Image (cartoon, helix red, strand yellow):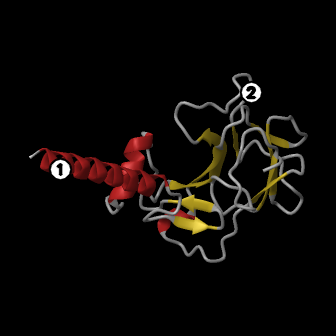
Amino acid sequence: MLRTILLTALSCILALGLGGGSAWFALDRADALGALNIGKWVAYPEAGTDRADPYTRARIARNAALPLAPAEGLVFSRRSDESDRPLRAGCQYILEGRLPSARFWTLHAAPLSSDASIADEDRRVALHSRALLRQPDGSIRIAIGPTIRPGNWLPVAGNGPFRLILSLYDTPLGSGTSISPLGMPTVTPEESCNA
């Protein structure tokens, strides 16, 4: 009798642990179901529609996010640099390249966990397309990190991991336009950042 109770309890604990762990893993993965990957950038184009898969809906609910509808735009995020190392707030990065066509876009850094903070209270925490210096060829170059830099600079304070969030508003990507020739900016660490 006691053996049966112990085996049943062990089975329940194992089932809850494996079930909860697999659900957490599925929600935390950047390349989950419904993801659109362009280089290291990830978006969920169906997040704001009724066609969103259950994992995308759960991710939205867990993060208390308000996804954009396809006609409004598309939100991309990335958690790693070009060498697949996680982005860290204590490091200095350079984001450069071209962006997809959009009427307006914003770029900001967000912590990976809700209890962490990477924003400096005294500085602006986001950049947008209408207040940005562009390169002569129309591309962008943005310094990201704790140390102020000339030109475009996105301040990030602290030492923890973070992700970059690029929101494209009123973009043809949201209406189902082909994305094959699309290029996204790269994020490379400066030499002073050790992995």
- Camera sees residue 118: yes
Q: Give percent across and percent down for residue 92.
A: 82, 44
Q: Is 145 or 136 nearer to us in this picture?
A: 145
Q: Residue at x 56, y 76 (%)?
A: 178
User: Can you tell which mark lies on residue 123?
Assistant: 2
Does residue 125 sit above or below 194 in this rendering? above
Label 1 neighbour load within 10 Å: few <14, some 14-19, many 20+: few
| Tag 2: amino acid | Arg
| Tag 1: amino acid | Thr
Label 2 neighbour load within 10 Å: few <14, some 14-19, many 20+: few
Does residue 128 sit above or below 184 in this rendering? above
Query: Pointer 2 and pointer 1: residues touching (CB < 8 Å)?
Result: no
Q: Give percent across and percent down for residue 149.
A: 88, 39
Q: Earlier in the sequence, mark 2 or mark 1?
A: 1
Residue with the mark numbered 1? 8
Could you say whether the residue bearing mark 2 is in a helix, strand or loop? loop
Q: Residue at x 71, y 55 (%)?
A: 85
Q: Taking 162 as reference, is 90 left or right? A: right
Q: Taking 104 as reference, is 158 left or right? A: right
